[in-house]
Amino acid sequence: MVRRNKDSASNDDNERPMRRKPFRKSTNEEESPAQVPTGDLQIRNKMVRQLLYAKLKRSKSKAKLKERKERQQSDEPKQEPQTIEKKRKRDETWVDENDQETLDDISNDELNNYFTRQPDAPEPKLLLTSQEGFPSSFTNKFLKEVARILPNTTYFQRRHHPIKRIIKKMNKLGYTDLVVVNEDHGKPSTLFISHLPEGPTMKFRLTSARLSKQLRSNRGKPCAKLTIRPEIILNNFNTRIGIRVGRLLAALFPHDPQYKARHLITFHNQRDFIFFRHHMYLFKNEKKVALQELGPRFTLKLRSIQRGTFDALYGEYEWTQKPKHKMDPERTKFVL
């Protein structure tokens, strides 16, 4: 056993390296908050760094507010905001009101009997269903709400019935349109609309589906069944494909809307996204009118247009969306 002397222990303590105190700048050399760089705050103390960052944001917002007030007080003309919609380029697919070629196509398409009110044209009668199997709870509620707001619509639980057999039965019963909603991860993802008996069939991507209970303006109330003919508004369908899509959407609703019922359904196209909204007019007085959204709401984006009724194997397509690597890189060109 080795014994250590007291002298050796003291020598070891003397040989230990001394800790150096951290170097601190003098008060004159320290940076003031005004000299702190705006991009990255080189301060190790988190609380001080947060306080300086909040102070920096307040100073920037005050400067912007001051510039805005100066612009409002000056007589300079206001600049219009440059959005992608305003930068849109009109290509060869853009249609004017008096385009004779488009008018000829419209007069010879499958929906001409409905819009010209031919005596043999039946009133719109829709069948709404889902994909094979049993839909999720949210999709089932969504389908029931869509069936409430579409006049003369029947909701059919498809389960394991094939689409072609359903179409044959619909032709015998006098239905005019088939609407199919598919789901992904428990939420609606795809919408098919097939006009009977000659087509066309259109496929849409369905996103942002919300029930009437989820809308803030509806105050958690469920959507009541629509027993009247609503007013229909179609916005910004300006190309040949857009006019074809708009005519198919309009053919889902009967003619002669009942304006006294004050119900309004809108299909608004913006940057090839079709926003569906259901409102009701609220007359506050003789001059002021407001809109209350009743729901449901969802967004559509066109994927393909197929001639004839639904045929996944041998269908002839008029238009399909290109894959991403083949799409036009310019963001100012639109399809609808």
Image (cartoon, helix red, strand yellow):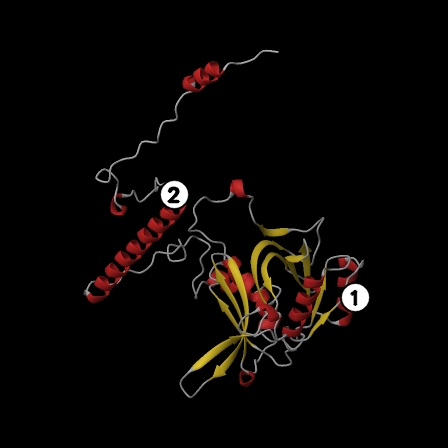
Q: Which mark is residue 205?
A: none
**Which three-letter amino acid code belongs to the residue tagged 2?**
Asn
The residue at the point 23 percent across, 62 percent down is 71
Classify 177 as above or below 257: above
Q: Which mark is residue 45?
A: 2
Residue 169's label in the rendered image is 1
Give the residue displayed 31% in from the left and 31% down from the top.
23
At which x and y percent is residue 99?
Answer: 45, 62
Viewer-side residue, 316 vs 162: 162
Tell whether 309 sits left or right of 85: right
Given the current orientation, which residue lies at the most extreme bottom position? 286
Tag 1 secondary structure = helix
Q: Position of residue 63 (x, y in %)?
A: 26, 56
Q: On screen, 332 above or below 65?
A: above
**Crowding at mark 1 (Cα within 10 Å: few <14, some 14-19, many 20+):** few
Q: Amino acid at mark 1?
A: Lys
In this view, the residue in front, 90 or 191, is 191
| 8 sits to left or right of 188 | left
Q: Residue at x 44, y 20 (%)?
A: 13
In this view, the residue farthest toward the top is 2
Above or below for 92 versus 268: above
- Mark 1 vs mark 2, CA separation in Å: 74 Å
Is 312 or 1 nearer to us in this picture? 1
Q: Earlier in the sequence, mark 1 or mark 2?
A: 2
Q: Is residue 228 visible?
A: yes
